[in-house]
Amino acid sequence: MPVTSAEATGHSKDLTLTPLVLGSAIPGWHTRIPELLLSPFSDADFKQVKECLKALAPIERQGMKLATRIELAAALMVSACEHGFEAAEEMGGRGHGAEFFGAVQQLIIRRAREIYGQGGA
C-alpha cells in the first residue's frame, strides 16, 4: 500500500508515491528515466523508501519549515552523491568520481521532478 504525503506529514493534500507513468515491474514505482530503469532497484528497495518516509512522518507532523526541509533534502542528496562518487572510484573509474557525483545529483533532480509531475511525494 503506497504511503501518501498526507499520511507521512499530516497535511490534507494527498500526494501518493504511486506514480502514473508505466515503466517498471515494481508495484507502485514507475519511471521513464532510462538510468533508473536499468538500475537494480527492487521492490525491497522501494519498501525501504516508504519505511524512511514513515519514520520521518512524526517529525514532519511537529512542523518543518521550508529551510529545514531543504537541509534534510540536501543531506540525503549528498549521501546519495557520495555513494555514487565512491561507487565510480571502486568500479575502476579512478578520477571519475566527481563526474559521477554530478551525474547522480542531476539524476536526483530529474527523479524529483518526475515524482512531482506524477503527483507523488
Image (tube, grey):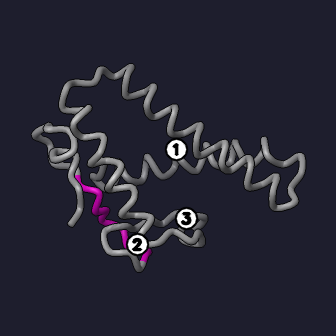
Q: Earlier in the sequence, mark 3 or mark 2?
A: 3
Give the percent coordinates (x, y) of residue 44. 41, 69
List the single residue furthest toward the bottom.
25
Residue designated by label 2: 43
The image quadrant where one finds the N terminus is bottom left
Name the secondary structure under disc 1: helix
Q: Which mark is drawn over residue 36?
A: 3
Q: Which residue is drawn at 36% across and 49% down?
A: 52
In the rendered structure, does residue 114 fall within the stretch colored magenta?
no
**What is the three-letter code of the residue carrying label 3?**
Leu
- Snapshot quadrant of residue 8: top left
Single out the mark in the foreground, 3 or 2: 2
The residues tagged by marks 1 and 2 sit, at their Cα atoms, a distance apart of 22 Å
Q: Nearer the viewer, mark 1 or mark 2?
A: 2
Q: Residue furthest left?
A: 12
Residue located at (22% from left, 46% from top): 5
Mark seen at residue 109: 1
In this orientation, which residue lies closer to the viewer: 74 or 109?
74
